[in-house]
Image (cartoon, grey):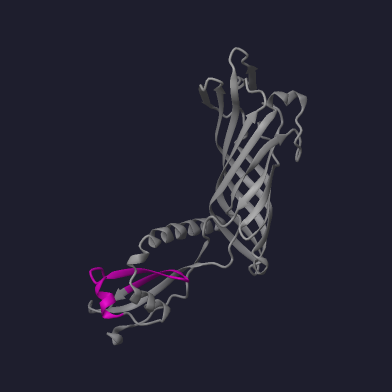
């Protein structure tokens, strides 16, 4: 529950930051000075919000985004108190929010690229993997070097079969296939998409060019699956079907890199298809990752500052 609250808080901060940055040019420099220099609220600043008994301002400066809430005095004519909250850029960033692109495949055993003869019709010509995280969070363990990181992401695996005239379909009790020799096919593919939640242990050393190492597991929820064929003449057919794929799965994931660029390896610890419905195959992928493609913001509420400004106006 606590982890989900942290993820929701980070996502909310990211959305608030995005909207506020669009209005950066309109930010009042006097208000920036008020926060940076701890200057009192002035009558001119107050006049901008006096139509509302409880007024708020959102200010941006290099340290982050600041939310200020003020209250009128009992006579309703002057601002009496203010409270300040911050969303600051955290030095304890995580590299779990990566953009991954690379090759994918599967084997009949864990960490294997070979497939059994019974699954030879599913032999691949090539596979493609792409993944990215939508938000991320980190729980430090040893200062900023070691921590537990998580997030929410999406990944796609596209498998192109060696037998281009092979047609897959979902039979009554198991995965079915046939070879259509009456038509000249140029492609036969299978695609799967997943919602992912990684839980990894991360070590990073910013003194050495932001070097990082990540290892852990990734839970997957299948949100889509389909097959696609293309004939030599250009005709395409696509069918949405789960082909008896497992709804839930999990895989090992590891990353190592420097300055936001690295390599990744993922290997499924659960099979692609449901037991007894299709050949037992374990997917894997490997490639390049970019880890600094989204900003990381950490929500921090400062000790609430309550200041009486009646004497200053």
Q: Nearer the viewer, residue 162 or 146?
A: 162
Name the quadrant of the N terminus: bottom right
- Residue at 62% x, 20% y is 165
Q: Is residue 226 left or right of residue 24?
A: right
x and y, in percent, of residue 172 in the image: 60, 19
- Residue range highlighted in magenta: 42-70
Considering only vertical position in the picture, is 6 above or below 132? below
Q: Is residue 177 left or right of residue 40?
A: right
Q: How many marks?
A: 0
Residue lying furthest top in this view?
182
Queried whether the magenta region covers residue 172, the answer comes back as: no
| Quadrant in which residue 34 is drawn | bottom left
Does the magenta run of residues contain 45? yes
Task: Kindly indicate the quadrant of the structure image that contains residue 78.
Answer: bottom left
Q: Position of residue 297 (x, y in %)?
A: 51, 63
* Viewer-side residue, 51 vs 284: 284
Q: Nearer the viewer, residue 20 or 305?
A: 20
Instruction: Tell me where residue 86 sits by quadrant.
Output: bottom left
Horizontal and vertical percent position of residue 121: 69, 23
**Which residue is depicted at the point 77% across and 28% down?**
116
């Amino acid at each position: 529950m606590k982890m989900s609250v942290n993820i929701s808080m980070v996502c909310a901060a990211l959305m608030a930051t995005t909207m506020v940055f669009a209005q950066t040019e309109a930010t009042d420099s006097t208000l920036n000075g008020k926060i940076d220099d701890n200057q009192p609220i002035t009558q001119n600043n107050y006049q901008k919000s006096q139509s509302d008994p409880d007024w708020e301002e959102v200010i941006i400066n290099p340290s982050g985004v600041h939310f200020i809430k003020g209250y009128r005095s009992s006579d309703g004519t002057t601002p009496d108190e203010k409270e300040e909250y911050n969303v600051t850029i955290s030095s304890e960033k995580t590299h779990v929010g990566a953009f991954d692109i690379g090759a994918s495949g599967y084997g009949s055993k864990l960490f294997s690229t070979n497939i059994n003869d019974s699954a030879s019709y599913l032999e691949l010509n090539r596979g493609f993997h792409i993944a990215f995280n939508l938000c991320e969070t980190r729980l430090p363990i040893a200062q900023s070097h070691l921590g537990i990181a998580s997030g929410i992401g999406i990944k796609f695996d596209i498998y192109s079969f060696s037998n281009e005239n092979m047609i897959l379909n979902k039979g009554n009790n198991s995965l079915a296939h046939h070879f259509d020799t009456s038509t000249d096919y140029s492609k036969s593919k299978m695609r799967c998409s997943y919602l992912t939640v990684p839980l990894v242990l991360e070590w990073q050393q910013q003194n050495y060019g932001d070097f990082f190492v990540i290892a852990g597991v990734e839970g997957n929820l299948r949100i889509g699956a389909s097959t696609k064929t293309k004939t030599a003449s250009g005709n395409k057919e696509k069918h949405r079907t789960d082909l008896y794929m497992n709804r839930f799965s999990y895989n090992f994931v590891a990353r190592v890199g420097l300055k936001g660029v690295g390599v990744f390896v993922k290997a499924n610890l659960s099979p692609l298809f449901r037991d007894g419905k299709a050949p037992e195959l374990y997917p894997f992928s490997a490639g390049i990752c970019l880890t600094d493609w989204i900003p990381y913001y950490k929500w921090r509420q400062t000790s609430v500052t309550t200041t009486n400004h009646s004497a200053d106006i």
